[in-house]
Image (spheres, rainbow, N blue to C red):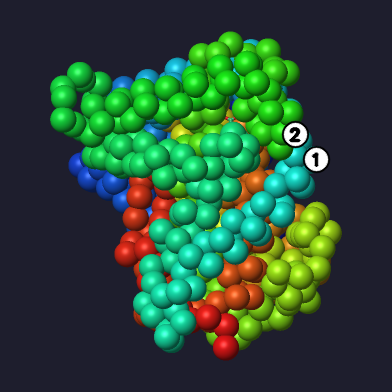
Amino acid sequence: MSGGRPGLTREPPVATTAVDARPLPRPPLRRQPGYLRRLLADPQPVLDELRERYGPIVGLGAGPMRIAVVGDPHAMHEIFTMSTDSFRWGHKFNVLGFVVGSQSMIVSDGADHKRRRRSVQAAFSRRRLNGWIPMIVERTDAAIDRLTPSLVDGPRQVDLYPVGRAIVLDVVVRSLFGERMAERCDEIGRRFQGPQDYLEAPAIRQVPHRLPFTARARARADRQALDRIVDAEMAERRAHPTGDPLDVLEALVVGGDLSDAEIRDQVVTLLGAGYNTTAATLAWMLWRAALSPTLWALLRAEADAVYGSVGSGSPPDETTLAALDLADRVMRETTRLHPAGAISPREAAVDLVIGGHRIPEGTLVLWSAHLAGRDAGAWVDPLAFDPGRFVDPTPEQGALADIAWVPFGRGARNCIGFALAQMELTLIVARLAQRLDVRPVSDDIPRPVGMVVSRPSGGAPMRVSLRA
Ligand code: HEM
């Protein structure tokens, strides 16, 4: 075990009044535009550099674009435990609203947010989540079966990133819309490409306009096509309810208190938030697990013991998931080092004190799961990939890890899909290790790309063969 180092606990910052709070440390004025530009294009290297040079809480920008980067786990804990009224999510810099819709919970505040989140939360009940377990393993098997004919003659180089994306999309569409929509997975996946390209376009190209043939125009067209799909499905659910207990859309249409426009925005939000994030994390997890043949063999041994032989035995359930202990720790360690969102934004709705620093109202607060996951005060040898660090931590180590492991956020605005994502990643990696021999084509972990969702550049090219 190598969790947080004993004796390394830092006292949480104590300044809680504006009087004894300090201004934010900042780079020299002339360097700030460069930092801002790089932060909004390729965040990880800039976050590391700012942390190294100016500390874990840094101010950038001026006037209408004031930013506070918060990478200190204790300060992040303060953010997560403050009243949600201290922040705004529907702020002027939030470009997500264009893609997910103005009534999405992700860009809502106050009572609207609570009501929209509550309705969706009810649909993500533990019973429904557990009901998805056999489907997740079955969809992983289906993807492996599709690969099999190309592998019968021996190992082949395969990019496992698109393979994983297809599994995740398959799972998310089936869980949101039930089995009936499964054959439209490819179409739904294509409709998410436009929005993803738009969100990753340089900030200047995201400025609102109605010009045709642009990333914004393509994102708008894709969103309209997704709306038509969801509208048709809502009408169908009303006319002919399927009674499928695992179908989230039916739960929202039949049992919820949201308007059709609100349901549409929540469904597109769930698809958007649940697809690219989980698929990117799966790619990082495959890199990390497959780089070590020993770890891959241990994952396989665990999967053999827990799943039993492929195609036999009883269907997997929540006890199967609970028994995949190593796969779960590989998931936790991967998300510590490669959180899908390196930074997550919220705007200060009032003057605040965070980590002992004054944060004026209107500042965009970017808390960073990337910096917390690599914080040297919270983790021993933070850059080492070591799933063993989560085994039997001392109470002190456990407490430090608890506040510094935040890939899914914390508190009232945490990730609503965290249990689904964790379940998918654990079950899928275990099944892939059980059925395939996989070695990355390079020994070097790729650099991350993507401003909104961090994924490995170049995907996950691996030498793959059927299990010997
Ligand atoms: C590895 C996969 C995922 C990661 C790393 C991730 C991470 C996050 C993070 C960091 C937040 C923001 C928390 C904040 O701003 O304070 C968030 C919010 C959210 N996530 Fe996820 N997420 C993942 C998968 C999913 C899935 C599978 C779904 C649903 C199917 C989902 C739905 C959402 C929604 C709806 C919100 C907004 C919650 C709110 O505003 O109340 N996410 N996620």
Relative image position of residue 405 (x, y in whole percent): 63, 53
Ligand 1 quarter of the rendering: top right
Describe residue 122's horizontal placement relative to residue 76 as left or right. right
Residue at 62% x, 32% y: name it: 413
Viewer-side label of 1, 2: 2
Q: Which residue is mark 2?
A: 245
- Residue drawn at x 71%, y 52% is 133
Q: Is residue 362 left or right of residue 335?
A: left
**What amino acid is at disc 1?**
Arg
> Looking at the rendering, in which quadrant would you find the C terminus?
bottom right
Q: CA separation, marks 1 and 2?
A: 9 Å
Helix, strand or loop status at disc 2: loop
Q: Which part of the image, by quadrant, shows the N terminus? A: bottom right
Q: From the viewer's side, name the closer residue of 171 and 62.
A: 171
Mark 1 CB in 8 Å range of ligand 1?
Answer: no
Residue under label 1: 127
The reply to whether residue 422 is in sight is no
99 or 132, which lies in front?
132
Q: Compared with residue 93, is residue 50 higher up or lower down, i.e. above or below?
A: below
CB atoms of marks 1 and 2 within 8 Å: yes
Where does the image place residue 47, in percent across and percent down from the top left?
A: 40, 52
What secondary structure is found at the residue carrying circle 1? helix
Q: Position of residue 208 (x, y in %)?
A: 25, 21
Q: For residue 299, what is the image quadrant? A: bottom right
Nearer-the-camera pick, 152 or 427: 152
Q: Is residue 212 something that shows in the picture? A: yes
> The residue under label 2 is which amino acid type?
Pro
